[in-house]
Image: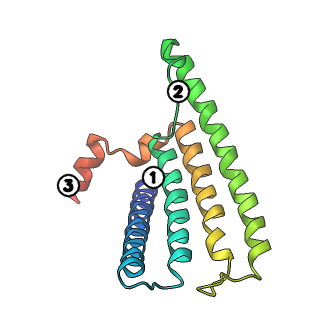
């Protein structure tokens, strides 16, 4: 179980860093392109495509992280007055529905990738499927993260209890 915990934590941190890198690259590219276009009256032809790619990848990875951290949008006005047991059941149903959405992302993401594998992006000449490869990947992460949260296993994997912290200190 400890190996699974460490692997899951590593994957989660890697995803967070990947999302951060995507946002930094997006910001640098857009800033540079704005400066080049407004000051020097010319820019790179590929900036819009790469910026779009970074934005899509950042957003979808961020969505998968948000499911695991339970920071997606929810309305608590009605549920806050319910008993704690009912709230837990509703949250589990909510995450099961999110898992179904993740499954749909995987299925339709693979279909879109298959449809776009023969076309290329005009400026970078990369396959168009590069833009959509993140759909099934993030869908799988959303699916797995939602199942972990619905089953209450997210705390066991991602939160260190005092025993695990003591063992890690001695190791």
Left or right: 137, with 41 as reference point: right
Q: Nearer the viewer, mark 3 or mark 2?
A: 2
**Spatial CA span between label 3 and label 1:** 18 Å
C-alpha distance separating marks 1 and 2: 35 Å
Name which of mark 3 and mark 1 comes first in the sequence.
1
Q: In the image, which disc is placed on residue 169?
A: 3
The C terminus sits in image quarter = bottom left
Mark 2 or mark 1, which is nearer the start of the sequence?
1
- Between disc 3 and disc 2, whose residue precedes? 2
Residue name at image x 52 percent, y 57 percent: 59
Q: Image height check: is 44 above or below 48?
A: below
Relative to 52, 170 lies left or right: left
* Disc 1 target residue: 1
| Residue at the spot 62% in from the left edge and 50% down from the top edge | 143
Task: Choose mark 1 or mark 2, whichever is in front.
Answer: 2
**Residue at the (58%, 86%) spot, across then down:** 124
Q: Where residue 81 sits: x, y (%)?
A: 49, 12
Q: Which mark is residue 75?
A: 2
Tell me if label 1 and label 2 are in contact, CB under 8 Å.
Answer: no
Instruction: Find residue 123 and report its horizontal and vertical position in percent.
Output: 60, 85
Q: Is residue 36 above or below residue 90?
A: below
In the rendering, which numbered label is found on residue 165? none
């Amino acid at each position: 179980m400890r190996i699974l915990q460490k692997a899951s934590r590593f994957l989660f941190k890697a995803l967070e860093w990947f999302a951060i890198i995507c946002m930094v690259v997006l910001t640098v590219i857009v800033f540079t392109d704005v400066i080049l276009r407004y000051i020097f009256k010319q820019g790179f032809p590929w900036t819009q495509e790469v910026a779009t790619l970074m934005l899509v990848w950042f957003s979808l990875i961020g969505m998968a992280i948000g499911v695991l951290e339970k920071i997606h949008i929810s309305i608590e006005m009605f549920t806050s007055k319910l008993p704690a047991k009912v709230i837990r059941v509703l949250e589990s149903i909510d995450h099961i529905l999110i898992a179904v959405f993740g499954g749909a992302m995987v299925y339709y993401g693979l279909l879109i990738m298959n449809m776009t594998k023969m076309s290329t992006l005009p400026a970078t000449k990369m396959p168009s499927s590069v833009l959509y490869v993140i759909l099934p990947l993030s869908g799988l992460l959303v699916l797995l993260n939602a199942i972990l949260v619905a089953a209450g296993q997210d705390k066991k994997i991602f939160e260190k209890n005092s025993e695990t912290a003591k063992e890690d200190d001695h190791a």
